[in-house]
Image (spheres, rainbow, N blue to C red):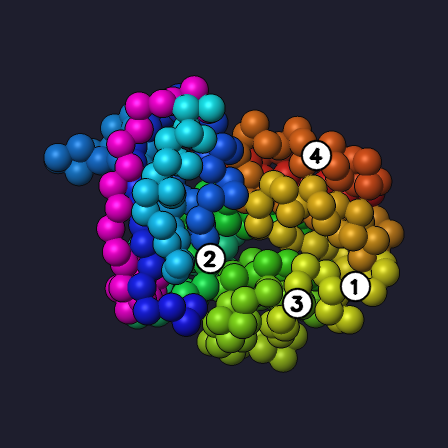
Amino acid sequence: MSCDSLWRVAFEVPDAAMPAVLDALEHEGQSVSAFEADDADGLAVERWRVEVVYAPPFDEAAAIERIRARCATAGWPDVDPVTSELPADAWLGAASLVYPPIRAGRFVVHPAGTPAAELPEGIRVQIEAGLAFGSGAHPTTQGCLMLLDETLRRTRRLRRILDLGCGTGVLGIAAAKAVPARVVLADNDPVAVRVANENAAINRVAGRARAIRSEGLSHPQVRRRGLFDLVMANILADPLCMMARDISRVLAPGGAAILSGLIGPQAPRVAGAFHAAGLPLRRRLDLGPWTTLLVAR
């Protein structure tokens, strides 16, 4: 990300409001995130802090007006957004990951410097995020890793895997560490491509897992018909629906796709798009308000 500063607009909503508010804000800003709010003692309460991040040019008044209007449409008009400037170096520091090891199925995702004694047994994946998305801490990433683990337990005959919208490469790297497959990691962000390749090298799978820059499935290494046994795409509901037929085309016979970046109310729409593309729903996993889907021929 080349900008000098970013802006964050944050507000809180009740637990019951969060799925509808996230759905309403899906196309707002560069990213929309939700975190369980804490009280003064650091204990989780039944409220969520929603954060919308903007890159320049940023019109604060217009952004707040849109947020309030969209929240009102979702049934929650009484939000109180607060804006703060986020320098790029602070954003980098926040994204460079200080978090405890995260277990999802057999996978253990952790940052550099975690003492070996603190790491649970499992398939260990070291991830440095930098400015790319995907630490393993978010429930959508955890859901993908859990369904990846379930898929690998049913079959190890996976020769080619695609991690679409790979971010840090956490999903594709985890797959490469679990099975001797060739993995293509694809993202339209050159920063993500660089970070994913660095993480593949850190995890000693660079010979089988390589990141490339691709707008969706446009890259020649991605768009070949019937190429992949498994596609993983942790992105957003609308892009997934738009790419359903393209994802179906690149799947080999008997192939499957793991889809996330969704909240519960969006899941039927995404599942319907993939069913129409010949990939009916096989499994749904909900972690709080977040949903991960497995579809397959």
Determine if the magenta segment contains residue 89. yes
Q: Earlier in the sequence, mark 3 or mark 1?
A: 3
Give the side of residue 181 with respect to residue 7, left or right.
right
- Local SS, label 3: loop
| Residue 223 numbered tag | 1
Mark 1 Cα shell of 10 Å, populated few (<14), some (14-19), many (≥20): some
Q: Mark 2 or mark 1, which has the lower sequence index? A: 2
Total numbered labels placed on residues in the image: 4
Q: Are marks 3 and 1 in contact (CB under 8 Å)?
A: no
Callout 1, which amino acid? Arg
Q: Label 4 vs label 1: CA separation?
A: 22 Å
Q: What's the mark number on residue 271?
A: 4
Tell me which residue sits at (50%, 55%) in the image.
107
Which residues make up the magenta segment?
74-97
Task: Tell whether label 1 touches label 2 (CB within 8 Å).
Answer: no
List the residue tagged with mark 2.
134
The answer to whether residue 102 is visible is no
Q: Quadrant of residue 67?
A: top left
Which label number is shown at residue 214? 3
Q: Are marks 2 and 4 in contact (CB under 8 Å)?
A: no
Amino acid type shown at disc 3: Ser
Image x and y of residue 164, in percent: 64, 58
Does residue 189 sit above or below 47 in this rendering? Answer: below
Question: What's the residue at 77%, 57% (across, down)?
Answer: 229
Q: On the image, which quarter does residue 281 sit in?
A: top right
Q: Earlier in the sequence, mark 4 or mark 1?
A: 1
Q: Which mark lies nearer to you, 3 or 4?
A: 3
Quadrant in which the C terminus is drawn: top right
Classify 44 as above or below 108: above
Cα–Cα span, label 2 and label 4: 23 Å
Which comes sooner in the sequence, label 3 or label 4?
A: 3
Q: In the depicted view, which residue is nearer to us: 219 or 127?
A: 219
